[in-house]
């Protein structure tokens, strides 16, 4: 509608859509007086006010129907105007009244609104907005200037978002679409409205655009994400947008590189890690479980690649592994690579000190190889020592990684990164720490980091291992076995985090506190207790005794278990352990309890007593303990606990029965933990009834070590078909099996 001032003349109507689609506002034509005020940007520059996005509110409404040739004098004639109070709702596509009568009998579509302006000329209604529609004008009058401006900006926003949704729903030329997206992002960033939906709405529009156009090239994908990147800093991406971050980065290395550079750019902002933290939170989502399974592996891949790049220059100088740049561009010929220089990393141990004591000083000299990014001591190939190994049997815990075994010559070794590499390292290690704080991500994160995917240089870098210690602590504190079991090596012959952060390990920087925590959590869930204790006795007995001497209760328990399970064969070592236990109050008390148990065990295992025994129904663990402590049961071969209330806790008493061959646990609460203990101690058991017990695959798999089993009842348990096949293959003497009412039936 054409409007003039009260003195007439001119066409002051402001056209906003002069930038792509709905960009900035055109200046008012010359010759106009105080007419409709230009839109958002001018207001924002003038007063710098902030407003909350309106969704609904009370306001006075007046609608004037007239031809387009009428002048604004009609609007200034008060006797022609009648105001109606309405409660208006700013829906997604229209302006509607809660009481559709009078002027607002029909809603006003945003597509029908040609212009939104503030009325500010002389004699104009106070605190009034003008909506230009075909064939007339809608006037909205607020109670004060702040409310008027709030309505103005909210209507402008709703109108523009509605048009962007329409335009971007049918894209034709993608270069134009990209330009419109940039304009949309600029509009969201400069809007005076403060509301979560202001930044979220553009993300939703782009998300829908990506979901409806699956034939986009990778480059077009990346261009769109780069355009909306400023909105991703503090906002959770919608599901379709998250699909970008959920692609397999192994197949799309450019996406990983983009994400890596984007995170580094966030880290360079004034807020630094706070912005990065918000980005990680947005990728996880507001709920307790991230709905996008590929997000975590991709973020970890980005972190690993970035951390590798911090040490890449030196890595390339010492071995023939291709650099990230070469991987991207094609690896160079082997003849162009530099010769191998083995890295020497670990702190010296007493054994290594004694072995190296006779070497000449010339052989102990280290060469320092420097680069712009890193300074690390290496040893010439001619002086590299053979790896020192100690076998603990096929199933024992593996020793330290050969490449981490070093001589005293490297005791003063240090790694120094350049400023940029140092900032990059700090950023991505901090992201790993953030990832470890999410309960739902921790199992997968532990599994991804279990093979120790970092270069040797990183493990030799004190700053890196000190910062990463937080992640390992989070694993050690998690009660879930799927998490803390990843502290151990992924397979025999390789080291795990348990070895690296134990005393003498390359990453250990404390007196064994983390080591004690790891031992405590692993012992609580490790069904191969004797095997684990044997590994500790062979590799970590010294640290265990030292921590026990300092009063660490976990280590006192470990030493007592070593004595109880006859792990230590050497008599002098046994006496030394006993002396260590008796040197502290807690150790002395626990050793006395051990002696009492041993006396009771001797009495229990003394030949005599019944060969068959059946406990009354409803008996408990305490009843069984009292019964077994009342005499000798060295001859007991058949024990029935069917229909009693015993649990896995009674396994501690059952393993003390040396002659037990048949055990009936039908309809009890005996579970996986008890099965694991039985499998390790009652290797001569021949008949086992687990019918209607709460055991699962986790416990049933442990039975594979009970080679004497010839009869096994797993009726009505949570046995799976795969576990059943595994047991049949590993139990050669198994003749009778009952798997009715299970998955394997």
Image (cartoon, rainbow, N blue to C red):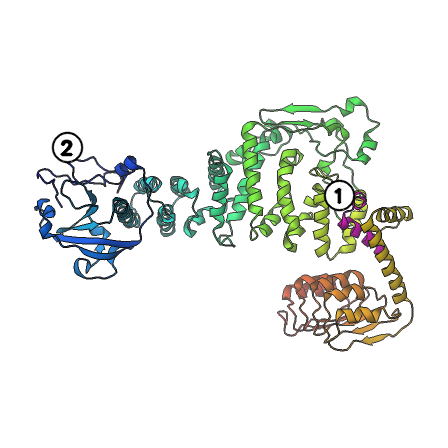
Residue 492 seen? no
Q: Which mark is residue 399?
A: 1
* Residue found at the far top of this picture: 362
Front-most of residues 644 and 428: 644
Q: Which residue is mark 2?
A: 30
- Segment tinted magenta in the rendering: 545-567
Q: Which mark is residue 86?
A: none
Residue 623 seen? yes
Provide the major secondary structure of the magenta segment.
Answer: helix
Which percent across, then down, holds residue 703? 73, 63
Front-most of residues 190 and 539: 190
Front-most of residues 512 and 447: 512
- Residue contact between numbered discs 1 and 2, judged by CB atoms under 8 Å: no
Which percent across, then down, holds residue 446? 61, 48
Which percent across, then down, holds residue 469? 64, 41
Task: Residue at 36% x, 45% y: name it.
Answer: 194
Task: Residue at 76% x, 66% y: name it.
Answer: 650
Front-most of residues 228 and 235: 235
Q: On screen, 409 above or below 527?
A: above
**Earlier sequence position, callout 1 versus callout 2:** 2
């Amino acid at each position: 509608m054409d409007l003039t001032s009260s003195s007439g003349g001119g066409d002051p109507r402001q056209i906003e859509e002069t930038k792509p689609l709905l960009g900035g506002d055109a200046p008012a034509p010359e010759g106009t007086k105080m007419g409709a005020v230009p839109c958002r940007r001018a207001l924002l520059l003038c007063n710098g006010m902030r407003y909350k996005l309106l969704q609904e509110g009370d306001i006075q409404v007046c609608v004037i129907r007239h031809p387009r040739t009428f002048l604004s004098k009609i609007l200034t004639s008060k006797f022609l105007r009648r105001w109606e109070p309405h409660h208006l709702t700013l829906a997604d596509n229209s302006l509607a009244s809660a009481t559709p009568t009078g002027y607002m009998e029909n809603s006003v579509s945003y597509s029908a609104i040609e212009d939104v302006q503030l009325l500010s000329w002389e004699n104009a209604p106070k605190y009034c907005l003008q909506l230009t529609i075909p064939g007339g004008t809608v006037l909205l009058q607020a109670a004060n200037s702040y409310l008027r401006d709030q309505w103005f900006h909210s209507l402008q926003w709703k109108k523009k978002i509605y048009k962007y949704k329409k335009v971007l729903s049918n894209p034709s030329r993608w270069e134009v679409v990209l330009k419109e997206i940039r304009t949309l992002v600029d509009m969201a960033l400069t809007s005076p409205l403060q509301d979560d939906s202001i930044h979220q709405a553009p993300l939703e529009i782009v998300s829908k655009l990506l979901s409806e156009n699956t034939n986009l090239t990778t480059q077009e994908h990346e261009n769109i994400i780069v355009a909306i990147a400023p909105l991703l800093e503090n906002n959770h991406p919608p599901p379709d947008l998250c699909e970008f971050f959920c692609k397999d980065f192994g197949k799309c290395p450019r996406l990983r590189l983009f994400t890596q550079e984007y995170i580094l750019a966030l880290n360079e902002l004034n807020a630094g890690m706070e912005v990065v933290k918000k980005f990680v939170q947005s990728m996880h989502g507001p709920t307790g479980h991230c709905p996008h399974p590929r997000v975590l592996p991709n973020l970890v891949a980005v972190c690993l690649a970035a951390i590798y790049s911090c040490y890449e220059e030196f890595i390339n100088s010492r071995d023939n592994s291709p650099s990230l740049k070469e991987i991207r561009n094609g690896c160079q010929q082997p003849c162009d690579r530099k010769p191998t220089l083995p890295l020497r990393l670990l702190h010296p141990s007493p054994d290594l000190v004694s072995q190296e004591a006779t070497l000449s000083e010339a052989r102990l000299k280290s060469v320092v190889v420097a680069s712009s990014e890193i300074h690390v001591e290496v040893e010439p190939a001619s002086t590299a020592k053979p790896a020192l190994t100690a076998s603990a049997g096929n199933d024992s815990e593996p020793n330290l990684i050969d490449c981490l075994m070093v001589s005293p010559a490297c005791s003063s070794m240090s790694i120094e990164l350049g400023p940029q590499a140092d900032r990059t390292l700090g950023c991505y290690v901090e992201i790993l720490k953030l990832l470890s704080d999410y309960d739902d991500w921790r199992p997968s994160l532990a599994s991804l980091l279990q093979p120790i995917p970092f270069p040797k240089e990183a493990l030799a870098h004190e700053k890196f291992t000190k910062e990463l210690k937080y992640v390992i602590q989070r694993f050690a504190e998690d009660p879930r076995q799927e998490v803390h079991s990843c502290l151990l090596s992924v397979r025999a012959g390789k080291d795990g985090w348990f070895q690296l952060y134990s005393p003498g390990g390359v990453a250990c920087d404390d007196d064994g506190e983390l080591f004690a925590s790891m031992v405590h959590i692993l012992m609580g869930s490790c069904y191969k207790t004797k095997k684990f204790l044997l590994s500790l006795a062979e590799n970590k007995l010294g640290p265990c005794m030292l921590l026990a001497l300092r009063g660490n209760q976990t280590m006192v328990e470990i030493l007592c278990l070593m004595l109880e399970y006859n792990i230590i064969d050497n008599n002098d070592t046994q006496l030394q352990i006993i002396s260590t236990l008796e040197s502290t109050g807690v150790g002395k008390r626990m050793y006395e309890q051990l002696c009492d148990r041993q006396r009771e065990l001797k009495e229990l295992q003394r030949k005599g007593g019944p060969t068959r025994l059946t406990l009354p129904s409803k008996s408990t663990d305490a009843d069984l303990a009292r019964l077994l402590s009342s005499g000798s049961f060295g001859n007991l071969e058949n024990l029935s606990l069917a229909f009693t209330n015993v649990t896995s806790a009674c396994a501690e008493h059952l393993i003390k029965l040396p002659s037990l061959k048949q055990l009936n646990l039908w309809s009890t609460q005996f579970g996986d933990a008890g099965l694991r203990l039985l499998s390790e101690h009652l290797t001569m058991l021949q008949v086992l009834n687990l019918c209607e017990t709460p055991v699962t695959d986790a416990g049933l798999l442990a039975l594979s070590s009970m080679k004497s089993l010839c009869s096994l009842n797993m009726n009505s348990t949570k046995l799976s078909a795969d576990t059943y096949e595994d047991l049949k293959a590993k139990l050669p003497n198994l003749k009778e099996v009952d798997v009715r009412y299970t998955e394997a039936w």
